[in-house]
Amino acid sequence: MEIIEVQERTPLLTEQLLLVWENSVRTTHLFLSNSEIENIKIYVPQALKEIPCLIIAKHKNGSPAAFMGIDGQKLEMLFILDAERGKGLGKKLITYGIENYSVNEVAVNEQNPLAKGFYEHMGFQVYKRTDHDVQGNPYPLLYMKL
């Protein structure tokens, strides 16, 4: 698996990453309804375009298996294809972010206990909790720091 930093966000790449995002969200965000996922999905291409640092883990055939977005020292997004989960790819990406971008903060949905456990395993600790997500929906966020 090759990790690359992406400068050019082509329509094809955005489409591929949207597939990774949706596959990952449908696997891990079981608290979201189908209509909520479809609504959020509308905003993902813009988020991919605007994130300052976009890093992708690519299969040998060039297709993305996972990606993360970093803004400053904050991990803003990390999504992994379900078929690639549990193989160390998340750890590899987070480690890359910590070593190359001094990533030291992340926010995670409280209803996504696997993500919370993963970040705790990586050394992050909860320092703040909100009752709602950034859109005002009733999905508490846990803010975590290294």
Image (cartoon, rainbow, N blue to C red):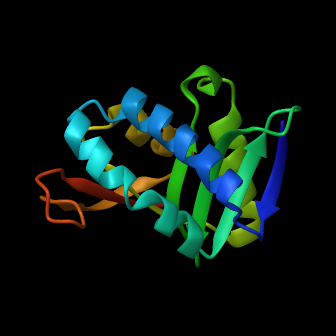
Query: Which residue corresponds to the image point at 49% horizontal and 45% vertical from the top-left?
Result: 119
Q: Residue furthest front?
A: 11
Residue 115 or residue 31, whichever sits in front: 31
Query: Which residue corresponds to the image point at 77% horizontal and 64% vertical from the top-left?
Result: 6
Residue 146 shows in the view = no
Residue 24 shows in the view = yes
Above or below for 35 versus 48: above
Return the x and y of residue 96 as percentages of the image width and height.
75, 55
Left or right of 143, for residue 3: right
Quarter of the figure with residue 44: bottom left
Residue 142 or residue 18, whichever sits in front: 18
Residue 12 or residue 33, whichever sits in front: 12
The number of callouts visible is: 0
Return the x and y of residue 18 as percentages of the image width and height.
53, 47
Query: Which residue corresponds to the image point at 76% horizontal and 62% vertical from the top-left?
Result: 99
Left or right of 16, for residue 144: left
Above or below for 103 versus 117: below
Quarter of the figure with residue 86: top right
Return the x and y of residue 66 as percentages of the image width and height.
65, 41
Return the x and y of residue 114 as percentages of the image width and height.
40, 32
On the rendered image, what quadrant is the N terminus found in? Answer: top right
Above or below for 83 versus 48: above
